[in-house]
Amino acid sequence: MSINKIRFNNLEILHLCKTNLKNSYISVKKNGDITLKTPKVSNRYIENLLLKKEPWIRKQLKIIEENPPKVHNLQDEVLLFGELFSIDSEEASKLREYLKKIDISKIDTILSCYDKYYKNYAKNYLTQRAQHYAKEMALSYNTIKFRKMRSRWGSCSSRGTITFNTELIKIDRRLIDYVVVHELAHLVHMNHSKKFHDLVSQYIPDSRGLIQELKYFCLGT
């Protein structure tokens, strides 16, 4: 494998050449890094590929720029629905109760309180949204579970068990609704076929755009 950097129309791109690849791939990471993976190809091929993909690359970079990660200060703020709220706000009342009962000199204990707070908030809010959309979609699930996950926002088993990432409560309500409908749609289609996406789009018309937007939120942080 060879690695080198490419300058293309003011974009810096990391090029990884892997001889065992059959196709070429371009990705834009959450920090704005652009990576191009190709088999052994000519410079002209790379230039033509980047010309073709440049609009898509710049669109992804714009999404990242418009959605910078929000960082909140422990014991000062909470992050809900993409907005920061003061620890003194009504939204954080339960968290204040938890923090009063612990030794706040221990960071791990504080983090556990935050996780407990987000999990309980997620349970209440996500259950309501799941019930709302299940009724609209005329679907029924077996049960809903909640846990903090690092690699996915949700899942749906063949037995009708839906699991939601408690970190969902930190992102925009539009994105939360998309994830809820996405997992409910798996009760009908256990895949990501056209029929699956068409079903999701019936209830979340801008689902295609939300899929891209959702990629730029960090999981498990």
Image (spheres, rainbow, N blue to C red):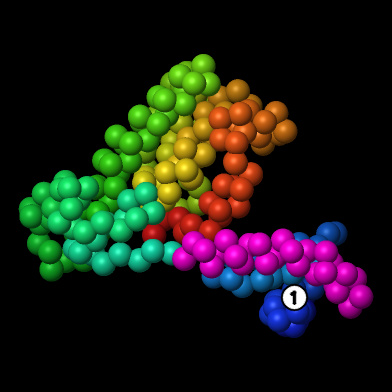
Query: Regarding mark 1 in the picture, which secondary structure is present there?
Result: strand
Q: Is residue 98 left or right of residue 128?
A: left
- Is residue 148 visible from the viewing direction of this image? no
**Residue sitting farthest toward the left:** 101
Type of amino acid at the residue the image marks with label 1: His
Viewer-closest of 204 and 113: 204
Residues in magenta, as a range: 41-68
Q: What is the x, y in percent for residue 56?
A: 72, 61
Image quadrant in which the C terminus is located: bottom left
By secondary structure, the bulk of the magenta-drawn segment is best described as helix
Q: Residues within 10 Å of mark 1 (few under 14, many from 20)?
A: some
In the image, what residue occupies the spot 21% across and 59% down?
A: 86
In the image, what residue occupies the spot 60% across and 41% down?
A: 206
Q: What is the x, y in percent for residue 127?
A: 36, 30
In the image, what residue occupies the spot 56% across and 24% down?
A: 187
The residue at which mark 1 appears reads as: 15
Residue 62 painted magenta: yes
